[in-house]
C-alpha cells in the first residue's frame, strides 16, 4: 500500500554527505555511530538529526526514529519533511489519526508539498476503509459499504495489507538549519525528484525507450493503457482478457471468485475513469516484464490514486498480466 518515505538529506557538510552515503550502502551501524558523533558536537543541527531519523528508520527502530522526528518538528516547526516522515512511521504502526495530524502540520508549513498531500489522501482512504468495515460489522447487508470497501481495498491494498503504511516514496532536500536561521531553512527546504503534483490530472505521455527494447516497451505501455481503457469503459470481458491464465489472485482466492468480485466492482459505479501516469517498464527476459505506474481512479463513488506494478508475461505474442502489486 503506502510505501515508507526513505528521504535522504542532501547536505553541504562533507561529514554528513559521507554518512548519508554509508547509509545508502547499508552500513547502518557505522553511519549511526558517525552521526551520533557529529551531533555530539552540533546537537541542534537539523540536517544531522534528520539523517539520524532516516538511519533509525532503515534499522527498523521506529520508536527511536519517531522520537527524533518529533523533537525535530518541535524545534523546527517550519520544516515540512520531519512531519511527513513522522506521519509515515505513525501510519506503519496503524496510528492513522496521529499520522493525519502530522501530515496536516506538514501541509500548513508548506502548502505546495505534494508528497504530504498525497500521503494525506492515502491516510483518508485507510480511515474510510476502517469506517466502511465497521459499518459492515454492524450491518452486513449494507451493499453500499461493501462496494466502497471493495474499491478502496483494490486501490490501496485493502485492510489485509497492513505491512506497509499509506505513504509515497520521494527523496527530499533538507536545507541547512542553524537555530538562528530556522525561518530561512524553511524557505530553502525543497522537494527534489517529486513523483507527482497534488491534484494533477492523469497524464498519458511518457518517454519512449531507446535501443532494441524500444518496441517491446511501447507495446507494454500500450497494453497497460488498453487495459485501463477497458476498465474505464466497464468492458468486463475485455478487461479480464488482459489477465493470464496463471494470474496470481491478490488474496489467493480462486480465479472464479476473483473474476466474480471484479465484475461486481466494475459494474457497480455509474462512471469510471482510470488514468495511468509515469509508467516505467522493466524487461527481464524475452517473455517477462513489469510495468510500474501511478494509477488515478475516479468514479461517482470514490476518487483515489496510488502506485501499482503489473507483472507481465508474453503469451502467443500478447502481453498479459500475471500479477498485480499495489505499492
Image (cartoon, grey):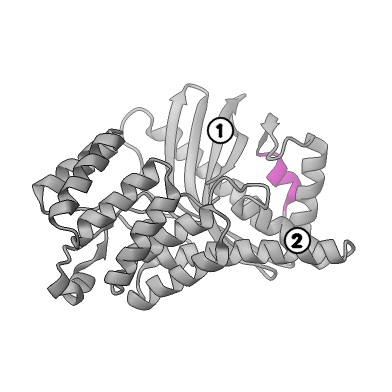
Secondary structure under badge 1? strand
Residue 241 in magenta stretch: yes
Residue 126: quarter of image: bottom right
Q: Residue at x 71, y 45 (%)?
A: 238
**What x and y, as percent, mark residue 163?**
57, 45
Q: Which mark is residue 229?
A: none
Residue 233 in magenta stretch: no
**What x and y, as percent, mark residue 243?**
67, 36
Magenta residues, dominant SS class = helix
**What x and y, as percent, mark residue 326?**
57, 46
Secondary structure under badge 2? helix
Query: Which residue appears farthest toward the right when viewing the image?
Result: 141
Q: Residue at x 37, y 64 (%)?
A: 70
Residue 200: quarter of image: bottom left
Q: CA distance from mark 2 to mark 1?
A: 32 Å
Query: Which residue appears farthest toward the top when viewing the image?
Result: 286
Q: Which residue is mark 2?
A: 133
Q: Which residue is mark 1?
A: 312
Q: Residue at x 12, y 46 (%)?
A: 15
Between marks 2 and 1 in the image, the one whose residue lies nearer the viewer: 2
Q: Residue at x 63, y 47 (%)?
A: 161
Residue 212: quarter of image: top left
- Residue range of the region highlighted in magenta in the rendering: 235-242
Q: Is residue 232 visible?
A: yes
In the rendered structure, the answer to whether residue 68 lies left or right of residue 173 reads: right
Q: Is residue 8 visible?
A: no
**What x and y, as percent, mark residue 108?**
38, 78
* In-front residue for pair 253/229: 253
User: Is residue 242 depicted above or below 196 in this figure?
Assistant: above
User: Is residue 7 depicted above or below 287 in this figure?
Assistant: below
Amino acid at each position: 500500500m503506502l510505501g515508507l518515505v526513505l528521504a535522504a538529506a542532501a547536505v553541504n557538510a562533507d561529514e554528513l554527505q559521507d554518512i548519508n552515503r554509508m547509509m545508502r550502502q547499508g552500513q547502518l551501524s557505522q553511519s549511526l555511530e558517525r552521526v551520533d558523533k557529529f551531533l555530539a558536537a552540533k546537537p541542534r543541527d537539523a540536517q544531522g538529526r534528520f539523517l539520524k531519523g532516516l538511519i533509525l528508520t532503515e534499522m527498523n527502530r521506529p520508536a527511536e526514529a519517531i522520537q527524533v522526528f518529533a523533537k525535530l518538528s518541535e524545534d523546527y516547526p517550519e520544516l515540512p519533511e520531519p512531519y511527513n516522515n513522522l506521519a509515515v512511521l505513525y501510519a506503519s504502526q496503524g496510528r492513522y489519526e496521529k499520522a493525519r495530524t502530522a501530515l496536516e502540520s506538514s501541509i500548513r508549513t508548506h502548502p505546495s508539498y505534494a508528497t504530504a498531500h498525497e500521503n494525506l489522501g492515502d491516510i483518508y482512504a485507510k480511515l474510510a476503509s476502517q469506517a466502511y468495515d465497521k459499518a459492515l460489522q454492524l450491518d452486513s447487508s449494507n451493499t453500499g459499504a461493501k462496494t466502497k470497501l471493495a474499491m478502496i481495498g483494490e486501490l490501496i491494498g485493502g485492510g489485509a495489507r497492513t505491512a506497509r503504511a499509506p505513504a509515497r516514496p520521494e527523496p527530499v532536500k533538507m536545507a541547512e538549519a542553524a537555530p538562528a536561521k530556522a525561518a530561512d531553512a524553511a524557505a530553502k527546504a525543497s522537494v527534489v525528484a517529486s513523483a507527482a503534483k497534488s491534484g494533477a490530472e492523469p497524464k498519458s505521455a511518457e518517454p519512449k525507450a531507446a535501443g532494441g527494447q524500444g518496441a517491446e516497451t511501447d507495446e507494454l505501455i500500450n497494453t497497460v493503457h488498453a487495459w485501463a481503457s477497458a476498465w474505464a469503459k466497464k468492458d468486463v470481458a475485455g478487461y479480464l482478457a488482459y489477465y493470464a491464465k496463471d494470474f496470481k489472485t491478490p488474496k489467493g482466492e480462486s480465479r472464479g471468485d476473483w473474476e466474480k468480485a471484479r465484475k461486481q466492482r466494475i459494474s457497480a459505479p455509474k462512471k469510471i475513469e482510470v488514468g495511468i501516469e509515469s509508467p516505467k517498464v522493466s524487461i527481464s527476459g524475452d517473455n517477462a516484464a513489469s510495468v510500474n505506474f501511478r494509477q488515478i481512479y475516479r468514479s461517482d463513488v470514490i476518487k483515489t490514486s496510488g502506485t501499482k506494478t503489473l507483472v507481465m508475461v508474453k503469451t502467443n505474442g500478447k502481453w498479459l498480466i500475471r500479477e498485480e502489486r499495489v505499492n
